[in-house]
Image: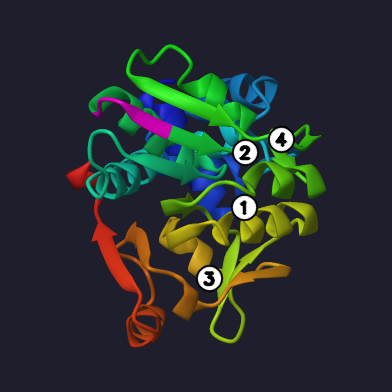
Amino acid sequence: MQLRHQQLLDLVNNKKRIPVAELSQKLGVSEVTTRKDLSLLEKAGLLRREHGFAVMISSDDITHHLSFNYETKHAIAKQAAQTILNGETVMIESGACCALLARELAATRRDITIVTNSAFIAGFIRKAPFARVLLLGGDFQNESQVMVGPLLKKYLADFSIDKFFIGTDGFSLNCGFMGNNLLRAEAIRTMGERANKIMILTESTKFNVQGVIPQFKAAEIHSVFTDTAIPAAIKEHLENQHCLVHLVTEASG
């Protein structure tokens, strides 16, 4: 993907709906070039065009989420990877930051074992020579490519893992970290029961939205890996709940 396309997607993601003229001005290119870029990105399923506007689309597809703010996500994943040693077994749920964490571990660690309910992650790192993947069973959610449901709980019964890494769809001071899908939220809570430490990987923008389904209270979370734009009040709240907050910048990735 060209740098200009990445910048365009980031602008659309941040504004949700943005005029083509404004995009052209911010990118420093003509409106003709911008429209050509929008046509390419629309065909790739990364945005939607309306008359005179570019509009973000809502999707649970991880490839879609990887298209936005990639450098920030990569920096978050690399920071989280520093907590994991060669030979460890970790559990990783789905999400863009989590997929990049799995790839980082597969590329830089030896004898690492990744337990996951994400078919996407299993495929994402399938060519890694030193990573072992244990893919949990269950009912398959097609768009998010994760396993959920009662069978997942059965598969997890014999597991006891130190670190469990997850993303989040939103946050509220009252409810904590939240998801948008009931079955997936239940799966994440079930996986969390089998882990000693639950660790959140998320861009700071998720702290500005509220999900639908409560997942974990702040006090249940060991660590949060995010970027420096996290609201100060939320950072203070997390730290007051004895949650470690690790801040990254794109430059650190």
Q: Amino acid at mark 3?
A: Asn
Q: Quadrant of the N terminus?
A: top left
| Residue tagged 2 | 117
Question: What SS does tag 2 mark?
Answer: loop
**Residue 181 numbered mark, or none:** none
Name above or below for residue 64 compared with residue 36.
below
Q: Which residue is mark 1?
A: 16
According to the picture, the residue beneath numbered tag 4 turns out to be 49
Q: Nearer the viewer, mark 3 or mark 4?
A: 3
| Kind of element beneath mark 3 | helix
Going from the N terminus, do you reach mark 1 or mark 4 first?
1
Query: Tag 1 or tag 3, which sits nearer the N-term?
Result: 1
Percent of width and height locating residue 200: 44, 59
Does 77 sit left or right of 6 as displayed? left
Cβ atoms under marks 1 and 4 closer than 8 Å: no
Image position of 196 with respect to 82: above or below? below
Start-end of magenta stretch:
109-113
Decide which of tag 4 and tag 2 comes sooner along the chain: 4
Observer-side mark, 3 or 1, equals 3
Measure the alpha-carbon separation of dots 3 and 4: 25 Å
Classify 10 Å Cα crowding around label 3: few (below 14), some (14-19), many (20 and above).
few
For the question of whether residue 223 can be seen, the reply is yes
Amino acid tagged 4: Arg
Q: Looking at the rendered structure, which numbered label has been put on residue 208? A: 3
Above or below residue 113? Residue 84 is below
**Most common SS among magenta residues:** loop
Q: Is residue 117 magenta?
A: no
Earlier residue among tags 2 and 3: 2
Which of the two discs, 3 and 4, labels the residue nearer the N terminus?
4
Tell me which colouring the rendered structure shows: rainbow
Q: Position of residue 202 (x, y in %)?
A: 45, 56
- Which quadrant would the C terminus be assigned to in this image? top left
